[in-house]
Amino acid sequence: MGSFVEWLPNVKRIARGIRLRVLRHTLQHGGGYLSQGCSSAELLALLYGDLLNLGPSCGPLVPPKFSAVPGASTAATHGWVYNGPRDPELARFFFSPVHYSLALYAALIEVRRLGEDALDGFDEDGSTVEMIGAEHSPGIEVTAGSLGQCLSQALGVAMARRRRGESGTNWVFMSDGEFQEGQTWEAFAAAHYHGVDNLRVIVDVNGQQCDGDMASVMSIEPLAARLDAFGSSVREVDGHDLVALRRAAMSGVAGRVRVILARTDACRGVELLRSRAPNLHYLRFKSDDEKAAYAALLRQMEAES
Amino acid sequence: MIKIVRRPHANRFVEWAKERPEVLVLSADLTSSCEVNDFRDAYPDRFISMGMAEQNMMGVAAGLAREGFSPWVHTFAVFVTRRPFDQVAMSIAYPNLPVRLVGFLPGLTTPGGVTHQAIDDVGLMRLLPNMTILECGDATDVESVLDVADSVPGPVYIRMLRGEVPRLFPASEPMRLGQARRLSEGTDLCILSAGICTEAALNVVRALGSQLSVEHLHVSTLKPFDDPQLLGSLKRGKMGVITMENHSVIGGLGSATAELMAEAGVAGPLVRVGLRDVYAHGASREYLMREYGLDEAGLIAAIERLSGLDLGALSVDIRDWVAASDLAKPEAL
């Protein structure tokens, strides 16, 4: 972690790069999880650009082909290698809402853990760069596609590392929709009961889910008060304000799970998307004209960067 | 006279775990009910109370296993297999993690009623790739299943017994992975029994005497179902095959046997003794086993069906000494 002068321009650049890559790929692919990239760009940029104390990637720049599921065969590949070696002092990163995988891969490219062409295999048959990634996909530590399951697994790892006296922190990136799952609350209750303090959770609170606005599907508010009541140390900030996010990440009550609720905008940086609200979950172009408008926006953003 | 062993798991597990510091117990508020209170008291730092929250418990167990610990999840069989099925499938079975899921009160062994009766657990776990399934039928199985499970590099589901457990097999003959116990050799009929049903099957085979020549196997590895001696035994019974299990006839031993016979082209009838696609209800174990045909009489009826013999007198004999044996096993909650 560097001084203010060092980290901010770099993290801003990563965030801009994530948005650009997600939009560019959505155009090339004829659709994609664009809004998730818009809401989480600053969060993933800050994590990979500053917060996560990771060693250098141990994965190849060109992601390996899918070889095998974990099993009797030892040929399975592991996405965690992109987050560096598993040293006691280093951080672990758990990526829960794996439909955000495109944004994660974009972040990995921006921080040079993946090569420029790594998205070529995205959603291609036989590739590990899956649309909804699993533990063989770059940067992904545990299989978490069934939402709400990642936090419990990360809690188990955090408890194991605490038993071994490891000083490294365990970061979990979550989406707000996962707070509709009962298992999420089971995990927060257990973490507090067992005094787990090496777990950090950063939540992209973009207020969106598959059916539309979360408020119209099943409200999870007041989220901060609920988490506080479950014993977590909660900081609620503007999820696009990097300075505020970083300050929140550095603070917290000792002995508690630290949670950063990042209030985000699912259309941030791609204003065109807003006309789609509240149907933002997955972008499919309705017409050539619409696609051309997004292409024009991409050219404009590329020129500005 | 069959010897009854009191709380074989409670005693064995504490001793077994002593020199295994990586062994942790996760419990969901059924600690005494699953006989791990002695473990908790002996090794409090290795006992993790997870509360009534099985979904999270499975994920935490997965995380601990990823880091090299050996988590032994203890709860009732229904709460291992039904409620957190997706968590067992995705957090544990998919990554092939060595988590040991110890499920108590299999089938009708609980007076707790339908919510507590795991009549579909073997079927559910058989569906999961990477999962190994073991079932205990006596105190020797209970004592030796720990080593068997520990030898498997992936997830294991154990149908465990508690309380007063009969010792049917010599303590010196431990359970072996993928190896059924051949309890009698014969050529008229093949009986495959699992779990607590083996005691009833032994009673019936003994009472049959020389009336029928029975090939009887006690199956403790329900998945993988690849013991090479199974096929030989299935082929040996001229009149056919009977499976007997404390489970639905769908998904468990009966289904596995049907699949094996069909794929290997073993011709001949198969009678599956078990719950015939019905739910049970809360009552004593003896009552339920009788009502649902999982006792000696149920097996005798199946044998009559296959052999055409009238074994009415036999069932009266057996009922007398089964009743005497049951007095030695008071129902425990």
Image (cartoon, rainbow, N blue to C red):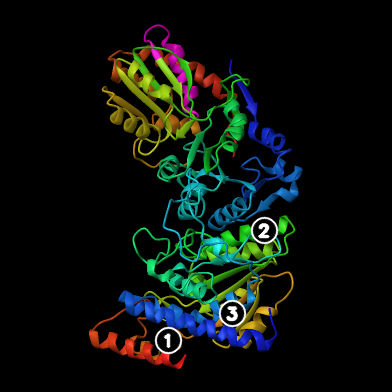
Picture quadrant where residue B273 is located: top left
Residue beneath the point at 43% across and 83% down: A20
**Residue B131, disc:** none
Secondary structure under badge 3?
Answer: helix
Labels 1, 3: front one: 3
Is residue B204 a member of the stretch shown in magenta? yes
Residue position for label 3: A46
Disc 2 crowd, CA 10 A, few/some/many (<14, 14-19, 20+)? many
Residue A212 x/y as whole percent: 38, 79
* Among the two numbered marks 1 and 2 on one chain, the one whose residue lies closer to the N terminus: 2
Q: Main secondary structure of the magenta part?
A: helix
Query: In front here: B36 or B238?
Result: B238
Q: Amino acid at mark 3?
A: Leu
Report whether B309 appears left or right of A38: left
Other-residue count near label 3 (Cα within 10 Å), few / some / many at <14 / 14–19 / ≥20: many
Q: Quadrant of residue B213?
A: top left
Q: CA distance from mark 1 to mark 3?
A: 19 Å
Of the numbered discs 1 and 3, the one sitting upstream in the chain is: 3
> Which of the numbered marks, if any, corresponds to residue A159?
2
Q: Quadrant of the N terminus of chain A?
A: bottom right
